[in-house]
Amino acid sequence: MSSAAETAAAEKAPGPAGSGSAQRGRRGPDRVGRAVYRFLRSIPAWVLWLMVIVWSVPTGSLFLNSFRHRDDQRASGWWTSFTEGNWTLENYADVLSSGEQTGGLWQALLNSFAIAIPATIIPIAIAALAAYAFAWIPFRGREWLFIGTVSLLALPNQVALLPLLQMFAGGAHWTLPGTEIVVTLFPDFSLAGTATAVWLTHTAFALPFAIFLLHNYISTLPGELFEAARIDGADHFTIFWRIVVPLSVPALAAFAIFQFLWTWNDYLIALTMLGAAGENYPATIKIASMAGEFGLREHLLSAGAFVQAGVPMLVFFFLQRFFVRGLLAGSVKS
Amino acid sequence: MKDHSNRRTRLRWARLLAIVLAFGLIAAACGSDDDGDAEEAPAATEAMADESMDDSMADESMDDSMDDESMDDSMDDDMSDDMMDLSGTKVTVFGPESSDEEAGALRDALDHFAAQTGIEVSYTGARDAADQINAQAAGGNPPDIFIFPQPGKLADFARDGHLIALPDDVIAAMNEHWTPAWTAFGDVDGTQYGIPNKSDLKSLVWYKPALFESKGYSVPGTWDELKALSAEMIANGDTPFCIGIESGPATGWTFTDWVEDLMLRFHTPAEYDAWVAGELAFSSAEVSGVFTEVLDLWNTPGMVFAAGGSIAATPFGDNGQPLVDNDCMMHRQASFYAAFIPEGTAFADGSADAVDTFYFPSVKGDQPVLGAGTLVGAFRDAPEVWEVMKYFASSEYAEVRQQAQTERKGGGLSGFLSAATNQDPSVYQPLEQSFLDILQNADVVRFDGSDLMPAEVGAGTFWTEGTAVVNGDKSVAEATQAIDDSWPQ
């Protein structure tokens, strides 16, 4: 993030500098002026560097601590490790080998993927279709339905966790007032304790925001495109698949990144929906639990945090090209 | 042209349908994982619920286990006939013990049980289990057995009707191995709901015997001797105590432990119980007097070494290093503190740098003990659940778990301790055996008071106001009044 901002600042700089060199007539004051200007011009870069340093210190110190022994971590600050050395990979070895009886951290990372991937793809698939419908298919009550959907954004997911868990654990049933008839609104699939319950919950809570974000984007696409397509005989699904999806890649990618990160780092929803089903725990819960009672093994948390953060970082480094290409693909009109 | 695009559209729809179907199948596959078991298990076991079989088998198993040195082999033969009926049933146990050593040793002990009985017992530990159990119980997804970190929490769940009272045969099995002082923590309004699972001993002072000897100090036997010893140490230029009470959101609990320990010493157990129940106010002369006693000791110049600069800024876990480095002579902390003492330190083996403990001295010559620990309670009424509960109550469980945990800690102190009687002491290290002696010989055992008080106080103002008086931000009168005001009516 910060490096991108920096390059942006660097690119901005040449413009005014070029115009300054155009007025070379008055030499004396001009040299002073240029020195002053150069100094002023360098300030944003230094401020940015300062911010980069300040913002990276906590992460950097955590990173250093993840290579230090427990007793060193307890006895002295991370900065002493520059002079003392005494690095170790023990913490990482402990983190990666922990919990062998329950499949260990590798199993937990697989569980995290099993939750995060469906919880990213499904809301995007549904929300893109819904956003297209809200933006380009006129139907009765469209505005109210859209307002209703978006206002769900204000619903904090914490208040719905227990009702959802009850629904997953025993289904949802409703006795018709005044009768003995019980209507099953949601059958008992015994979902409590499964990864399905977790990504279903993530999907449900992601939809309002996803629809809102994608609607805002898709509704700005030029209507002429759709008219032209319709004249060529395309129906809604063809328009959606052939025109809307390719043009919306930047918005889809942006949402996918955030949704993947949120679900990958989620702790509360997973713990609530899984309960005592430890074999399905994602990495967040496994890593937090490594600290043990009274924080006996808190020294493992720093290494665990980097294992946990490593996967999204790898995903970004490998997929960065595609994200950037997606962004450009949306910005250039042909 | 029209036909062509129609065909293409149809193709697209087919593809979409395929994707939706694929997701549906995946969802179904994930969801049905434990579908069958969950529904079949209770039905199957209820059909077999045969009380007489239940009783006789459990008693036999307890007796056998005590006599036999090698528990693993001998039990299989005579047990297998009776147990056949329950094999294949499943019991889930959930609890806050989650690190590799603790949860691993707990699982080892349960595997040992599973090998004998065929009952599949799975244990899941999560750091926030104590908070999460509320959601699980309310959401209709409770585990079969939960390990409660505090008796207060167990009582809440029992009163709300979530927990099942122990059947008589389970109580009988428990009483064989636990003294009334400990089983009382699982008693809610006269009904037994919980079984002690693990015991911590809090009335301990860590010190280095060889250092005491070389400096001519002797282990104090009374509170006055302890104060005299501290004065002597200060006069010699030594710092008597390492104290640090920082513990994240729980900062202050170490201070509450000192207050509780001294409440038990200066006053009667009945007064302690009245205080914990909210009948004796914090602002009373008794309780505020103990606050003052603790603070006077801590505030004596030269009394305290705080590695973090001040008592409230020093993490409680950071007091082990200065003790080993001789920056202080003593540190009052529970039996589990062995795990915070730097690696490589010897315990009670007579070597020059070995660390040992002595009993936190009494005031009146009695031997009150401040304890803590966990309790198991059952959410499901089924014979296999009660078998597991009986196993948790047994000394066999304590022995197997202790052995496994010692092994997992690489032969050091395990951090596990059980006050169950009839345990084979040889599974404990010498220092741990001395803890057991204190626990089992105690006249008076009281549970950590802050764990028994309502959460607003015991996990709230008692900590925060305690920290404020330690920092000198408030007077004892102000702080104790504030705690009283926060007590829920």
Image (tube, coloured by chain):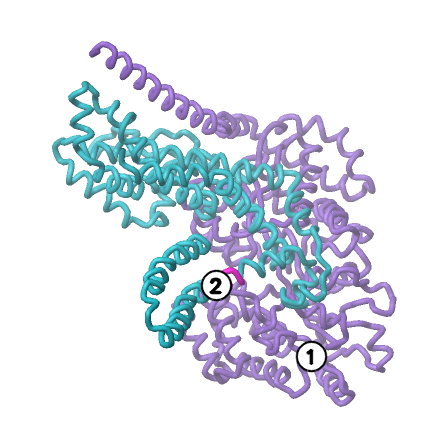
- Among the chains pictured, the one given cyan colouring is A
The image position of residue A274, as x and y in percent, is 48, 40
The image position of residue A107, as x and y in percent, is 58, 37
Q: Residue at x 66, y 42 (%)?
A: B107
**In the foreground, B403 or B249:** B249
**In the foreground, B423 or B292:** B292
Looking at numbered disc 2 in the image, what kind of residue is underneath it?
Trp
| Tag shown at residue A235 | none
Q: Secondary structure at mark 2?
A: helix
Nearer the observer: mark 2 or 1; the answer is 2
Question: In 3D space, how far apart are the residues under numbered discs 2 and 1 (Cα atoms)?
Answer: 65 Å
Tags 2 and 1 both on a single chain? no
The image position of residue B88, as x and y in percent, is 61, 27
Q: Residue at x 44, y 79 (%)?
A: B481
| Tag shown at residue B364 | 1
Q: What subunit carries mark 2?
A: A
Q: Residue at x 47, y 76 (%)?
A: B281
- Among the chains pictured, the one given purple colouring is B
Q: Which residues lie in the magenta part?
A: A50-57
**In the foreground, A252 or A326:** A326
* Residue at which label 2 appears: A49
**In the foreground, B311 or A67:** A67
